[in-house]
Image (tube, grey):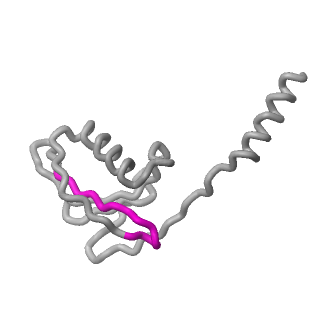
């Protein structure tokens, strides 16, 4: 009983001392021609003429600098698309925050996608 109470108190202390980051919510204004993919497991996934873009939370990147997060993302993309070719990164600002737009091309089923 005392071990369980001690564990419960420890968990309560951990969550009060180390608060969890608040959940982020975003809205997207689509440029002309882009359509939301209905039924996607991702909240934000869009298509236009075979091109796509997604917005997805990646908790594994939390705590990393922007440059480190971009490098890690490119490494992961390279694991799944071994022939990926990246265009130069574009620095952007989103809601007042520094961000990076990455564009890459890859082939799948004999087709080249970018």
Secondary structure mostly seen in the magenta stretch:
strand
Residue 36 rendering spot, x and y as whole percentages: 36, 65
Residue at (22%, 60%) from the top-left corner? 51
Left or right of 113? Residue 28 is: right
| Range of magenta residues | 93-105
Left or right of 81? Residue 41 is: right
Residue 29 rendering spot, x and y as whole percentages: 40, 75
Residue at (39%, 49%) from the top-left corner? 69
Q: Quadrant of residue 100?
A: bottom left
Q: In the displayed image of the protein, which residue is found farthest to the right?
A: 1
Q: In the displayed image of the protein, which residue is found farthest to the bottom?
A: 32
Quadrant that contains the N terminus: top right
Residue 81 rendering spot, x and y as whole percentages: 22, 41
Instruction: Identify whether 108 is placed above or below 43.
Output: above
Q: Quadrant of residue 25?
A: bottom right
Instruction: Identify whether 28 is placed above or below 50.
Output: below
Q: Is residue 95 magenta?
A: yes
Quadrant that contains the C terminus: bottom left
Residue at (76%, 47%) from the top-left corner? 16
Q: Quadrant of residue 14?
A: top right
Instruction: Identify whether 91 is placed above or below 9.
Output: below
């Amino acid at each position: 009983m005392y071990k369980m109470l001690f564990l419960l108190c420890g968990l309560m202390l951990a969550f009060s001392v180390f608060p969890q980051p608040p959940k982020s919510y975003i809205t997207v204004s689509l440029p002309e021609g882009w359509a939301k993919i209905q039924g996607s497991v991702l909240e934000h996934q869009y298509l236009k003429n075979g091109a796509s873009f997604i917005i997805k939370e990646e908790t594994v990147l939390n705590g990393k600098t922007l440059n480190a997060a971009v490098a890690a993302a490119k490494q992961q993309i390279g694991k799944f698309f071994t022939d990926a070719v990246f265009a130069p990164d574009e620095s952007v600002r989103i809601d007042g925050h520094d961000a990076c737009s990455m564009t890459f091309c890859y082939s799948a089923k004999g087709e080249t996608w970018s």
